[in-house]
């Protein structure tokens, strides 16, 4: 039986992601930037929290973790990073296997936005919880890593199955659309995606998750090998 995936909007534009293993009822949250919204959602579903996954140390991804741990007796899993030392119960790294009840996955180290950033992959359904590494139509700012490191991180993501759900940490899709269109104006799939995104946002609905296939067709940072886009990107000063 598969994992049920839900998103909880919180703060100004963050998403926490809820993973519920239907076989066992085990439940996890990724990046609870605030506790109340997550708690309220879990209550409406009748879920009890087992695991709290953190992708990186930024406050808007971790600030609800401690209160949720206390309330549910959950454990916090995340990167090995001094800045998370007092919060994380179990450190994870590249290649570590993940289990939530009968659902399984693994950890991807994806430096770029921060040096210790992790993404969490589960296989049924195929879903990537990618924090601030990749956004729909864009990517996270390079606060700590280099462009080369981020590119290597993208290569790991690109290798996942195309139908993989891309579950990002922020609702930035519409904000990213202008730049994406600017560097890739003839991309028909991108035009269609922007129309869809405008419509979803006008109804207050999330544009996420997207799929890897969709990002490969529309996200300029995954399409950079396309020569025309590369030319535009080189001309942009604030590429990242
Ligand atoms: Zn961040
Ligand atoms: Fe963030």
Image: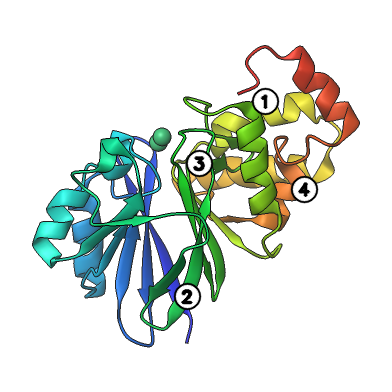
**Residue at the disc numbered 1:** 179
User: Label 2, on which residue?
Assistant: 104
In the image, is 232 to the left or to the right of 64? Answer: right
Neighbourhood count class around disc 1 (C-alpha, 10 Å): few under 14, some 14–19, many 20 upward: some
* Mark nearer the viewer, 1 or 2: 2
Q: Residue at x 19, y 59 (%)?
A: 39
| Local secondary structure at mark 3 | helix
* Disc 3 residue crowd, few under 14, some 14–19, many 20+, Cα 10 Å: few
Marked residue nearer the N-terminal end (3 or 1): 1
* Nearest-to-viewer mark from 2 and 3: 2
> What residue sits right under mark 4 in the picture?
217
Report, in whole angstroms, how far the alpha carbon at label 3 lies from the one at label 1. Answer: 20 Å
- Quarter holding residue 149: top right
Residue at the spot 64% in from the left edge and 47% down from the top edge: 196
Cβ–Cβ under 8 Å for marks 3 and 4: no
Q: Choose between 189 and 47: the one closer to the eye.
A: 47
- Whether the residues at callouts 1 and 2 have beta carbons within 8 Å, the answer is no
Q: Quadrant of residue 10?
A: top left
The residue lying toward the viewer, choosing from 56 and 218, is 56
SS class, disc 4: helix
Q: Which mark is residue 202?
A: 3
Q: Secondary structure at mark 2?
A: strand
Q: Position of residue 226 (x, y in %)?
A: 86, 36
Asked whether 7 or 238 is in front, the reply is 238
- 4 and 1 marks in contact (CB < 8 Å): no
Residue 69 in the figure: left or right of residue 207: left
């Amino acid at each position: 039986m598969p994992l049920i995936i839900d998103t909880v909007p919180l703060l100004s534009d963050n998403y926490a992601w809820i993973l519920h293993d239907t076989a066992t009822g085990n439940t996890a949250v990724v990046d609870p930037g605030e506790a109340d919204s997550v708690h309220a959602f879990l209550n409406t579903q009748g879920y009890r929290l087992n695991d709290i996954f953190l992708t990186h140390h930024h406050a808007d991804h971790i600030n609800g973790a401690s209160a949720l741990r206390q309330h549910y007796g959950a454990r916090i899993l995340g990167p090995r990073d001094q800045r998370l030392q007092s919060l994380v119960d179990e450190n994870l790294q590249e290649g570590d296997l993940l289990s939530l009840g009968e659902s399984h996955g693994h950890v991807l180290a994806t430096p770029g936005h921060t040096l210790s950033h992790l993404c969490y992959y589960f296989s049924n359904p195929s879903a990537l919880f990618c924090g601030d590494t990749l956004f729909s139509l864009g990517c996270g700012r390079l606060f700590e890593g280099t462009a080369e490191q981020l590119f290597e991180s993208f290569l790991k993501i690109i290798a996942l199955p195309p139908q993989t759900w891309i579950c990002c940490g922020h609702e930035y899709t519409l904000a990213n659309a202008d730049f994406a269109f600017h560097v890739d104006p003839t991309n028909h799939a991108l035009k269609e995606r922007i129309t869809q995104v405008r419509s979803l946002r006008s109804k207050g609905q999330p544009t996420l998750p997207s799929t890897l296939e969709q990002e490969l067709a529309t996200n300029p940072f995954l399409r950079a090998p396309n020569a025309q886009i590369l030319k535009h990107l080189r001309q942009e000063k604030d590429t990242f």
